Image (cartoon, rainbow, N blue to C red):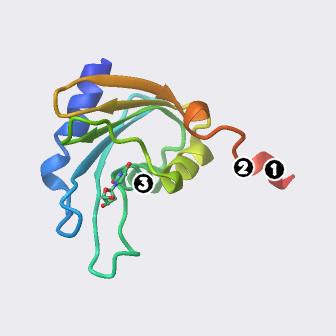
Amino acid sequence: MTREELCAAAQAMLPMAYAPYSHFPVGAALECEDGTVYTGCNIENAAYGPSNCAERTAVFKAVSEGRRRFKRIAVAADTDQFCPPCGVCRQVLQEFAPELEVLLVNRRGEIRSLTLPELLPYSFGSANLT
Ligand code: THU
């Protein structure tokens, strides 16, 4: 899959977002090492705290179906600015894919490529527990 296709899969999730409080839809598409793609959207809640970001929706879908090795994630927002993953999502992504490539795509279809080590330097992970 090309990075444009992965970004398109993330953008296709924007209409699925349940974001009645922020009105800020986010879509994600997570590519596994075996080529499988899991998508996600943000899912908000009236109590705010239980809300889930698009990235974590995609990761939790994948892990719950037995995938734990990931290559890339694309994150789409319907804004001119890119939407970088929040701190909680960065930590969740670190658990499974410390070297992950993170593609950000805005509403104009522009793509920015980053790595998780750039987004979460000197991170805490399973190795710190040994
Ligand atoms: N959100 C995501 O889904 N992913 C991000 O990377 C940043 C923020 C969601 C959370 C909330 O539903 C809305 O965007 C506004 O913060």
Decide which of tag 3 and tag 1 comes sooner along the chain: 3
Q: Nearer the viewer, residue 15 or 35?
A: 15
Residue 48: % across, % down: 34, 75
Circles 3 and 2: CB distance less than 8 Å? no
Q: Which residue is mark 2?
A: 124
Q: Is residue 49 above or below residue 43?
A: below
- As helix, strand or loop, the secondary structure at mark 2 comes to loop
- As helix, strand or loop, the secondary structure at mark 1 comes to helix
Q: CA distance from mark 3 to mark 1?
A: 22 Å
Residue 124: % across, % down: 72, 49
Q: Does residue 46 show up?
A: yes
Give the residue type that dot 1 points to.
Asn
Q: Which residue is mark 3?
A: 56
**Residue under the point 28% across and 36% down:** 81
Q: Which residue is mark 1?
A: 128
Query: Any mark on residue 42, and which?
Result: none
Is ligand 1 less than 8 Å from the beta carbon at label 3? yes
**Residue under the point 53% across and 45% down:** 93
Circles 3 and 1: CB distance less than 8 Å? no
Circles 1 and 2: CB distance less than 8 Å? yes
Q: Is residue 41 above or below residue 74?
A: below
- As helix, strand or loop, the secondary structure at mark 3 comes to helix
